Structures are given as structure tokens and as C-alpha cells.
Amino acid sequence: MMSQTLIESFLKKHQLPADYLLAVNDWFFPVVEKLLAEQQALKKPLIIGINGTQGSGKTTLTDLFHTVFEEQYQLKVASLSIDDFYLTRQERACLADTVHPLMATRGVPGTHDIDLAMQTIAQLLQTDKETLIPRFDKANDDRCNESEWTSVTGPVDVIIFEGWCLGARPQSLEQLSTTVNDLEENEDSDLVWRYYVNQQLQDSYLQLFNLIDKWIMLKAPSFDCVYNWRLEQEQKLRSSISDPQMTMDDLAIARFVKFYQRITQHLLKTLPDKVDFLFELNSQRQVTKLLKK
């Protein structure tokens, strides 16, 4: 069980309700103990992948695991988000010019620097190396200056890697040809954007995903929840920065989540059977069931 002092500090840090403690004790901590046993049995750092839709609680769960491993079990932990490996705004603008205008918007496979992600993980796995972890500023829609990156000195025992598209597999050409929303229908009628994104999954992303030892999924009940959950995220961001006008309004969020819809729906159908720990969520993001391999 997570120590009382530790859980109280964690709840305060993330401004979580007291009943989150029940989720920790009933659902999450038993998984921590199983992952701890896996880490002790390995001869190398354990790499944990956490998948979930936007707003599903991936970042909070990542920090929970990080906190418990580090403070309760004295392990060295590095936490990564695929969001921090987005290409810079200038790099995405170049893709918009050379591939498709929709590539200017961060999110889909093809808008991440996978080489940088692979290099970062490889360096974390090297003993006694100092590794800089990139950070991305969503309010500015650009990668932070290197002076703002996080430094981690090895050796690490655990790497926690979270992201909305972790574990996604490419679709068939037949699947790609059926539009899932008006964004695809009106702005990608020739399927160039969809084909490019799908090819990225087939190539470099699979190499990245294959590095993960143990998989966790926070499974939303449906894609319909994503808009509301992402809206809550943006509201929190808006309240935490000096210039709220740098954030997206409700209409912009509604358009933004359409970029994620195809792969999110595909993941909801295909990933549950492949993960080691599946947390099923309700529309309030509460865990209702845990399925394990």
C-alpha cells in the first residue's frame, strides 16, 4: 500500500479528490507491485508503456508510478511523454509544404521526432550517462529551448513512456479509404495525409514501440469522451499560463480532436487484447475494471 504521507502529497500536487486514494489502493498499486517484480527479474531497466486517449489520466498515472517507484522503493526513474518529442513548429510547417497542409498540426504519427525519442531512450539505458529529456510547450505549440529540458543521470531502473498513440498499428488501405469525420472528407479527399501518417506507423514508430517491455492501457468507453476530456485539459492549461489567448477555444478543440479520431478509434478496438494491464474507464475517468494477461 502506498504510504499515507506520500499519497497525501500526491493528491495535493495534482489537486485530486480524496476518492482517488481508492483507485490507487484498489487498482493502481497492485499493478505497481507486479511491475516492481518484473523490474527486479530483468537484467536491464524496465520500460513501461502507458496508452490512453487525450485527457484519460496518462500523465497523472505516470507521475503516480514514478513517485511510488522512486520515493517508496528508491528506484531511479525517468518519465517520458511522446508529446515532448513533437517536431518543432518550423519542422511541421515544412512538412505542411512538402507533404500535406494537415501535417502542420501536431498530434498524428509523422509529427514526432522518433529518432530523438530512440536516442533519448538509448542514452537512458547507458550506465552513468546524463540524458536531457526534451519538453514541448503546448501553449506556444513548439519545443522548449534545450535549457528547459529535464536532466536525468543514469543508471535508471525504470523508464515510463506515455502517449496517446503508443501501440498503434497501421491500417489496411481499405480502412484508410473510409473517412471517419469531415476533416478527412473535406481536407484529405485524396488520402495523401492518411497514407503518409499510416506509413509512419509502419516504419519508425513500430521500432519505438518495440522497445516497451510492459504495456498499460487506460481505455476510454468511446471516442465521444475525448472532446470533453481534452476540453478540461485546455481549461487547466488556460488557468496556468499568463496569456490565456494562447490556448484553444472550444471550436478549435473540436477540430483538434478530429486529427486524433481515426487512430484513437482503431486503438480502442485493437490494443486491449495486446496490453498487459487494461484499465477500463467510465465517462468520468473512473476505473471500473482491470484486466490482466
Image: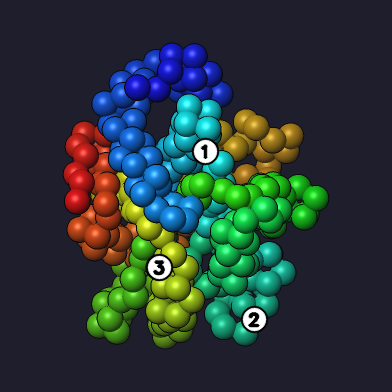
Q: Is residue 122 left or right of residue 263?
A: right
* Cα distance between the residues tagged 2 and 3: 31 Å
Which residue lies most toward the right here? 147
| Amino acid on which disc 3 is placed | Asn
Disc 1 or 3, which lies upstream in sequence? 1
Q: Identify the residue position indicated by label 1 in the image.
A: 75
Between residue 186 and residue 19, name the one nearer to us: 19
Q: Identify the residue position indicated by label 2 in the image.
A: 97
Between residue 157 and residue 30, name the one nearer to us: 157
Q: Is residue 127 left or right of residue 284?
A: right
Q: Is residue 138 left or right of residue 148?
A: left
Which residue is at a point 36% across and 49% down the rendered structure image?
A: 41
Instruction: For mark 1, give the secondary structure.
Output: loop
Q: Identify the residue position indicated by label 3 in the image.
A: 210
Which residue is at a point 49% across and 47% down the rendered structure image?
A: 158
Instruction: For mark 3, give the secondary structure.
Output: loop
| Amino acid on which disc 1 is placed | Leu
Q: Please tell me in which quadrant of the rendered image residue 119 appears.
A: bottom right
* Cα distance between the residues tagged 2 and 1: 45 Å
Dot 1: within a 10 Å radius of its alpha carbon, few (fewer than 14), some, or many (20 or more) residues? Answer: some
